[in-house]
Image: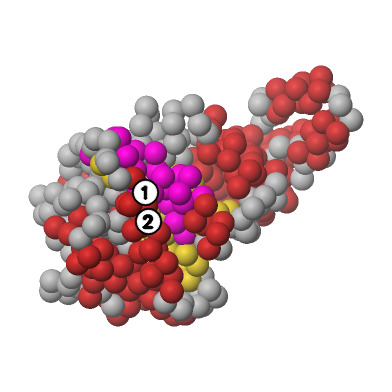
Amino acid sequence: MSYEVAREKYAQYGVDTEAAIKRVAEIPVSINCWQGDDVRGFEDPDRALSGGIMTTGNYPGRARTIDELRDDFDVAAKLIPGAKRINLHAIYLDNGGARVERNEITPEHFDSWIDWARVRGLGIDFNPTCFSHPMSESGLTLSSPDTAVRDFWVEHCIRCRKIGEYIGRKLKDTVITNIWVPDGSKDTPADMAGARERLKDSLDRIFATDVSQEYNKDAVEGKVFGIGAESFTVGSNDFYMCYAISRGKILTLDAGHYHPTEYVSDKISAVLQFLDEILLHVSRPVRWDSDHVVIFDDELRAIAREILRGGFEKRVHIGLDFFDASINRVAAWVIGTRSMQKALLYAALEPSALLRKYELEGDFTSRLALMEECKTLPFVDVWERYCEICGVPAGGEWLDEVRRYERDVLSERV
């Protein structure tokens, strides 16, 4: 009954709630696997994180094996509406307990992930792992002046692109393989240009290997700074924006990789004037790139609005990037992904046609008034309908399921 009332209220502004639900249900969100095990992976789970990657907290129940991580993800996925993908790093390979160097990984190391994802109807996205490794201890990988180090990481990234293509072929889907490196300097270097020339050369070598664009698309990701790279980041946002445009690659915009006064939402329509596609890493920075769990805040809603206002659903690939070991990790997945889904639905319910009409007519009074009225429309009733259609809990009762899983499964992990 409440949904029917909400449907009528939205219809007064020309919004079809059923169409909005259908639109959002078809937008896939790529969920980061690394929330479940604190970005450790299964290459060497006991190795300390490095390269600007840091997880805080020690909440009990961290996934220690691939099976545990998949079980945890399954629990979370059943509580999240909409289309879903899983985003893997190379360190999540299924190595059968054997040591496999990163420049020797093969597509077959991800066969079990492919089989698992196929059964669940999940897409997969992929990332080279250019951190937390002896060959990255200097703080430089693809931009290293050491040829052996640079060659090692070039080979790793080439293999990761081939893995992405292999996964895409097996799943009859397109994988987004995103390259990010932590390269930078704690203090001001003497030769910024040299480091960037080496990075550009390494990337060109990586992309010179032919990989089917039908099954794998390449993305590159910049950053302002990181821990240990406060004064200089080789792959800055300027560098990668120019590289993506000049090389025809997807540009990755990470919500935490900018200055505190910059907003990714403002960049979406700007870069899409010059790029065919972009990848979003939706995170929640708190004063810096701290990768907090995504919540239904102003910036998340603004990101979703810009995607849907422009009709960019096919050109913007949405991925999540957060990890918090201070709370239940399964709950973090659910909270973050449901927040992204809420933001998309909230945006889909905006009377954008009417707002655009007012704007083109120069009626900014009506535009502002309507924007404010939209904030108190009965969104929650439509959200509950969306969850009902998808067969997931609409309200906070999803937490009961997570608590049961924590009691019965997570608490047993020592």
- The reply, left or right, for residue 237 in relation to residue 275 is left
Query: Does residue 39 belong to the magenta stretch?
Result: no
Is 90 situated left or right of 253 in this image? left
Q: Residue at x 41, y 45 (%)?
A: 236
| Residue 126 x/y as whole percent | 39, 63
Circle 2: residue type: Glu
Residue lying at 14% horizontally and 58% vertically, measured from the top left = 134
Residue 309, percent across and down?
70, 43
Q: Residue at x 72, y 26 (%)?
A: 371
Coloured how?
Answer: secondary structure
Query: Are the two marked residues, 1 and 2, in contact with CB atoms closer than 8 angstroms?
Result: yes
Q: Position of residue 393 (x, y in %)?
A: 48, 46
Give the left or right position of residue 57, taking residue 402 as reference: left
Classify mark 1: helix, strand or loop. Answer: helix
Image position of 121 with respect to 304: above or below? below
Q: Nearer the viewer, residue 59 or 31?
A: 31
Numbered circle sitting on residue 260? none
Q: Quadrant of the N terminus?
A: top right
The residues bearing labels 1 and 2 have C-alpha atoms spaced at a distance of: 6 Å
Residue 69, position as x, y percentages in the image: 27, 58
Q: Which residues are magenta?
A: 219-241
What residue is drawn where x is 86% and y is 33%?
A: 360
- Residue 197 - label: 2
Residue 193's tag is: 1
Residue type pointed to by label 1: Ala
